[in-house]
Image (tube, rainbow, N blue to C red):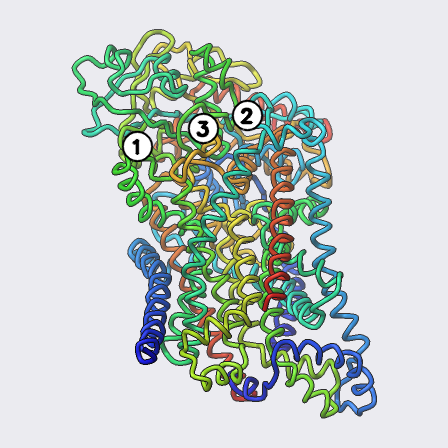
Amino acid sequence: MKESSLRRRIFADRAFQALVALLSFCAILPMFFILFFITKNGIAVINWNFLTRLPAPVGETGGGIANGIIGSGLLIVLSSVIAVPVGVLTGIYLAEHRKGKFAYLSRLSVEILMGIPSIVIGIIAYIWVVMPTGSFSAISGGVALGIMMLPVIVMSTEETLKLIPDSLKEASLALGVSYPRTILKVILPAGLNGIVTGVLLSVARVTGETAPLLFTAFGSPFMAVNILKPVSALPLTVFNYATSPYPEWHALAWGASFVLLVFVLALNLTAKLGLRKWKVQF
Amino acid sequence: MIQPIEGGAGQTPARAKTRDKTMTQTKAETAQAHYRPGFTLSEAAFRKILYLAGISVLVLLIAIFLSLLIASLPSIKALGISFLTGRTWDPVTLKFGALPFLVGTLITSFLALLISTFFSIPISIFLGYYYREGKASSFVKTVIELLAGIPSVIYGFWGLFFFVPIIRFIETALGVPPYGVGILASSLILAIMIIPYSASLGREVISLVPNDLKEAALSLGATRFEVIRKVILPYARSGIFAGILLSLGRALGETMAVTMLIGNSNFLPTSIFSPANTMASVIANEFTEATGAVYLSSLIELALLLFVVTTIINIIGKIIIIKTSFEA
Amino acid sequence: MKNLVVCLMAAVVLLAIASTGIAKEQELIGAGATFPYPLYSKMFDVYSKEYGVKVNYQSIGSGGGIRQLINKTVDFGGSDAVMSAEDLKTAQAPVLHVPTVAGAVVVTYNIAGSPEIKLTPDVVADIFLGTIKKWSDPRILSANTGTKLPDMAITVIHRSDGSGTTNIFADYLCKVSKEWKDKVGLGTSLNWPTGLGGKGNPGVAGLVQQTPGSIGYVELIYALQNKMPYAGIKNKKGNWIKPSIASTSKAANIALPDNMMVSLTDTDAADGYPVSGFTWILMYTEQRYGDRTEEKAQEVVKLVWWMAHQGQKYAEPMEYAPLSKAAVEKAEKLIKSVTYGGKQIMK
């Protein structure tokens, strides 16, 4: 009797582990399908010229997406400068103030921000930045993307920090380390893994966005680095190429998508390597 | 890297809460009484900065809300309540009823949430408990993070190429019109798109469940399955739910992939196979070409409506989180 | 991490300083219609090589182009549709419509074997209204004697996004079908009585190619490039016209008004394809507004003049219909009417 119930429990344990592994495996399958799908369609056009040249008109060969790569890089830097400090600080605030009406409102705001469609954020950035300045600009695109990054960074920072045991903080404070120092030098590094994952997710979220950039960063066929003027971005390049009637441009769209994907992959790996360095210090 | 922290963790959640309260009262004095080497930022200033950051998201949200409200005033004046109850969306005669889009948005998002939970929670357990370190874990984790980075358009293209033929085959077998695109197709693609959001948070909270809790349960003879069911899930419940809410927000606002797969029909959906439209997809579809004050502002009112719906759903979610954490 | 943030901030500040230091070179900004985007990008590429003036044109949609012109964030707009009376009023100053090329919207379909079919205007309207439901409908068969059509349900595919293409198509259907005019009407987005929506021309083309028994409408270039079949349509004079670049250009062989704000659909021209239309460059007649320099105004006028003349030779190789002689003459008059502070810019 006892034996059989034990056997049942062990069986349930094994079965559950197998189920978890199976479902996890199923969930990552689409990634490989999509990766294969993009690579199959995109790899053919990838070469050095494609990465370093400006777009060429239909009928001419050798056009590239350098403007999109530079523009996307610039936009990501701009939006990170806006979103990362605010996002991490807000995350700390929320993790430190778990109760209270104000923290509740602040937390609710973050969750609502997450649900605003990207195109609406584009419209907002247009009203706030483009209309007053009278011109499309990289900075307005950065504002739009920054607003989109913010909720992801805040939520992952908060949830990560919240679960770091209080004993760590208490130990630090008891040793006479000041409160700011405890947060910045003890708590933050301890949760760095989760925070960086959040930042990565947020960058990944905005890297592929077209809609909020149409009316803000606008796009440009030239090598533009002026943050007060229109710049291109990879998704805009994909959009322009993919909506055209020409098969050779469709190939370029796939190529640009492939580059976008590789870029996100590289970002992930770089962050992983960077974290390893941090780990030693910690 | 979280190991050393957990080694030092020695308290149940209930104890942690009470201790946190007493700490906040005493730590100000402790910190001030001590010498702080080489650090100039005062505690008061630091707290003020944190407070400002906390306030900034609220201000941002209110500013967005007001901008949308002002921009949608012409349509609110012209249409009134019929915007919510009307079933016809006709830019030609300036009749704008958003009910079909509201229904379409809610059905696709919740269906997607339901599907994604079946995968995101197992992944969280897989990464947060069974395989916390090692090659398999970091591989799965990287892949999941990458899923978040795939542009929406690509999901759309892939869905057209992968899901639509399968669904069309099922539809032919069932005898419904074989459109392929529709609510089911877009919910499936949405489910995949939101997995990274709920899984990353779920993994984080599960892996941060204190070791001694798990060890205590194991030493009492519990199997790992029982540890998950009786210790980990109750402990991490609110975090997992927060992750699901985060992914719901993403699902509600997603545009491009949904637009490509939902069939874009302005009628109230009758089954999960019927084509429909979501609020976000209508805005994305029509905003670039819309001219005329009422038309433009009714599209912005649609954004406002989405905003309000998201707010309501989030408040309901909050209430559920509070309830569940009381049970635990 | 803090170091990283500091580095990033420094980089941005440096960029800002560096970019303001760069000499101001002449750059024109235009935005609008998606349809002429590939052609414009070719034209502007050639133009910048010849004259050293950079032109940045982005395809944000005709409606977007009109709004940007009204908000004065661009030097010129691009549109497949004439500005509405309401928009012209909001613009507060007279806006010129200078045609650059013409395009055709074709009815494409997915029937096994891709037989060539012919459709009368009323049949097209009734299919898209949802009253003709099967390919074996006697009204379709009567115009296609000898063609084998399956006994299959018709699935209508339309644009889900607002579009100049939809506008031209609806404009045509309004002229040939009273029921369409009363029930659906004219616009860039419509309340479609039946069918599925696809995003953009590629979206419609993709859905049509995937769905057996479907029918949709796309721009001629897309049908040609994707090797999709398209229907011949009976025009106003009773001739069966197969859409082509030539029959699109010929649709403009009608009495053109001086302001060129004219619809070419259901054309009176005997050999013109009836679902055609111009695409326009939009600009203010009085170029002195905001902080605009006279130099910039001159550059815009020069560019548009070039597009209506030398630029035309790039249209046909890319499967756009070039302007007819009469249309070019009208365009010249329009461009010459542009002023800066009341002074004529081009004489």
Q: Say whether mark 1 and mark 2 are on the same chain.
A: no
Observer-nearest residue: B244 or C258? B244
Q: Amino acid at mark 2?
A: Asp
User: The residue tagged with tag 3: helix, strand or loop?
Assistant: helix
Q: Which residue is mark 3?
A: C165
Label 3 near label 2: C-beta < 8 Å?
Answer: no
Q: Is residue B183 left or right of residue B164?
A: right
Q: Is residue B41 left or right of residue B153?
A: right
Quadrant assignment, res A179? bottom right
Q: Which residue is mark 1?
A: C224
Give the percent coordinates (x, y) of residue C47. Answer: 48, 41
Observer-nearest residue: A147 or A182? A182
The quarter in which the N terminus of chain C is drawn is bottom right
Disc 1 to disc 3, C-alpha distance: 16 Å
Task: Name the front one of labels 2 and 3.
Answer: 2
The residue at the point 36 percent across, 19 percent down is C127
